[in-house]
Image (spheres, rainbow, N blue to C red):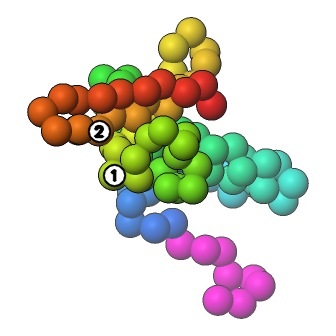
Amino acid sequence: MTADERPTPPRELDQVSRDVLEELAGRDVATLRTMSSYLEDVATWKARRTDDGEATSATADPDAYPDDVPERASVSVTEIGGTEYYYYQWREDDEIRSRTEQL
């Protein structure tokens, strides 16, 4: 692609209103970069969520686990009252253990 060629929207954006794409294409570079950063943040947030608003299981960095939580624990991130929490859950023998940490 040369500097004069306008990028072609990816197929995934075919369903997005052409008016929206035209509006974005008319914006200045600084605004587009700001929008891009915001949309990355939204995508990261949304990837952690399910359709019903509950947190999804996440793969956390084992080095970030609290000392008393085993590395095999599953981790969910949830938001309660505007505060995000890690919810760790694991099995010890016949019991299910859990721990919650504020992010």
Q: In this view, does 52 lie to the left or right of 18?
A: left
Magenta residues, dominant SS class = loop
- The numbered dot on residue 59 is none
Q: Position of residue 71 (x, y in %)?
A: 41, 52
Q: Position of residue 37 (x, y in %)?
A: 72, 51
Q: Quarter of the image holding residue 29? A: bottom right
| Residue name at image x 35 percent, y 45 percent | 73
Q: Write down the region rendered in magenta.
A: 1-8
- Magenta-span inclusion, residue 101: no
Alpha-carbon neighbours of circle 2 within 10 Å: few (<14), some, or many (≥20)?
A: some
Give SS at disc 1: loop
Q: In this view, does 89 lie to the left or right of 42?
A: left
Residue 56 against residue 44 in the figure, above or below: above
Residue projecting furthest to the left: 94
- Residue flagged by tag 1: what amino acid is it? Arg
| Residue name at image x 22 percent, y 29 percent | 96
Give SS at disc 2: strand
Quadrant of the drawing holding the N terminus: bottom right
Look at the numbered discs 1 and 2 and tell me whether their residues touch, using CB distance below 8 Å: yes
Residue 18 against residue 82 in the figure, above or below: below
- Residue flagged by tag 2: what amino acid is it? Trp
- Magenta-span inclusion, residue 7: yes
Residue 59 against residue 53 in the figure, above or below: below
| Residue name at image x 78 percent, y 56 percent | 33
Q: Is residue 29 left or right of residue 21?
A: right
Q: Position of residue 52 (x, y in %)?
A: 30, 23
- The numbered dot on residue 90 is 2
